[in-house]
Image: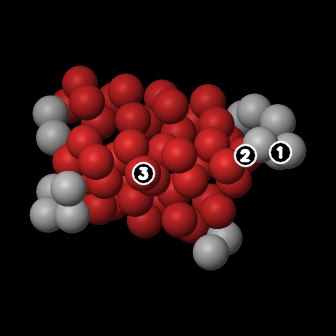
Amino acid sequence: MTFEQMNKWTQRFNQIKGASQKLKNKRLGNMLNDLVLAHGPNDFHARQMYLAVMDEMEV
């Protein structure tokens, strides 16, 4: 994952965190799916973002 890609994922994550709580978990779930499809399970930085999203979802 490049710095630019990580920056875009971070911006998306922060936007979701600051948005309506009503759709927050659904949007975070969609982000997880997109993250896995885009980078797979072996990318260290993608995995760190994945874990941060999971923490935010309180799963």
Mark 3 secondary-structure assignment: helix
Task: Name the front one of labels 3 and 2.
Answer: 3
Amino acid at the residue labelled 2: Lys
Residue extending farthest to the bottom is: 59
Labels 2 and 1 touching (C-beta < 8 A):
yes
> On the picture, is 52 further left or further right than 39?
right
Which amino acid does the dot numbered 1 rest on? Answer: Gln
Residue 21's label in the rendered image is: 1
- Marks 2 and 1 sit apart, C-alpha to C-alpha, by 5 Å
Tag 2 residue? 24
| Nearer to us: label 1 or label 3 | 3
Query: Quick one: SS at disc 2?
Result: helix
- Please give the label number shown on residue 54: none
Q: Residue at x 62, y 75 (%)?
A: 59
* Disc 3/disc 2 C-alpha distance (Å): 14 Å
Which residue is at the front of the view, 50 or 23?
23
For the residues labelled 3 and 2, say whether their Cβ atoms are less than 8 Å apart: no
Residue plotted at (57% across, 67% down): 55
* N-term mark: 3 or 2: 2
Tell me: residue 31, above or below residue 36. Answer: above
Whole-angstrom CA distance, mark 1 to mark 3, is: 19 Å
Q: Crowding near pointer 2: few (<14 within 10 Å), some, many (20+)? A: some
Which of the numbered marks, if any, corresponds to residue 33?
3
Is residue 23 toward the left or the right of residue 12 in the image?
right
Q: Label 3: few (<14), some or many (≥20) within 10 Å?
A: few
The answer to whether any part of residue 44 appears in the image is: no
Question: Residue 38: horizontal and vertical position, in percent?
Answer: 25, 42
